[in-house]
Image (cartoon, grey):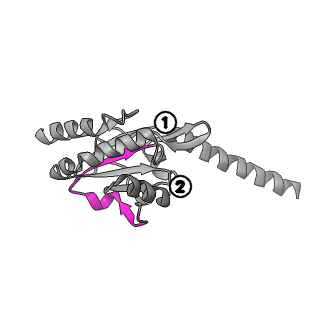
């Protein structure tokens, strides 16, 4: 019997070690411009599944933020909301992602009159895929990173450690520059 216990323990150690290595590596690897954007399907503030694939043919502003209804995240969301018509005119959609729940997103959208999709990544898979999982005092949250994805599904531009007051303006400027070329 002890032979089976040791074998089981060895398997557990190997599996947990592999998961830890994947998590550590993914936490630190931000996809770069030119790479195909990792695909995903996440629920929005209404609980409706939203897939990146449905936006082929459009520019996608995929921004990760730490926490609903906090000062920096509210500022960033308001900046995107204020410029929403400019993004629509540029054939772009805005998708905000955090690890907060669908209910939290719904409250945030209602409280702050946000009309674009906020996606719930409660399982933290997409934040890992985009190298955007952070740690704040032992709590796993999204880092403030933004990805501009072109109409073919490739990452066109990446911003890490984003300034919430400048995010929307910087993305609009980059979008205009990329559309010229």
- Residue 8 is marked as none
> Where does label 2 land, which residue?
123
**Quadrant placement of the N terminus:** bottom right
x and y, in percent, of residue 168 in the image: 28, 40
Residue 82 located left or right of residue 114: left
x and y, in percent, of residue 129 in the image: 45, 47
Residue 154 located left or right of residue 101: left
Up-down: is 49 above or below 34? below
Closest to the observer, 58 or 112: 112
- Please tell me which residue is depicted at 61% across the width and 43% down the height of the picture: 20
Q: Nearer the viewer, mark 2 or mark 1?
A: 2
Q: Secondary structure at mark 1?
A: loop
- Residue 28 is marked as 1
- Mark 2 to mark 1: distance in Å? 18 Å
x and y, in percent, of residue 119 in the image: 41, 56
Number of other residues with Cα within 10 Å of mark 1, as a class: few under 14, some 14 to 19, many 20 or more: some
Residue 47 on the magenta segment: yes
Closest to the observer, 1 or 63: 63
Magenta region, residue range: 46-65
Report whether residue 154 is seen.
no
């Amino acid at each position: 019997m002890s032979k089976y216990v040791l074998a089981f323990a060895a398997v557990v150690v190997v599996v947990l070690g592999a998961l830890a290595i994947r998590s550590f590596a993914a936490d630190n690897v931000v996809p770069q411009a030119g790479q195909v954007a990792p695909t995903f399907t996440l629920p929005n503030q209404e609980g409706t599944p939203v897939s990146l694939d449905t936006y082929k043919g459009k520019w996608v502003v995929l921004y990760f933020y730490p926490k609903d209804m906090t000062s920096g995240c509210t500022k960033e969301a308001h900046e995107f909301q204020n410029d929403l018509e400019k993004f629509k005119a540029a054939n772009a959609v805005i998708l905000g992602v955090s690890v907060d729940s669908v209910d939290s997103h719904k409250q945030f959208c209602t409280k702050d009159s946000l009309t674009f999709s906020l996606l719930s990544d409660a399982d933290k898979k997409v934040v890992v895929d985009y190298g955007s999982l952070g740690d704040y005092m032992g709590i796993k949250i999204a880092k403030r990173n933004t990805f501009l994805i072109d109409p073919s599904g490739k990452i066109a531009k990446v911003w890490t450690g984003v300034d919430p007051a400048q995010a929307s303006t910087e993305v609009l400027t980059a979008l205009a520059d990329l559309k010229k070329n």
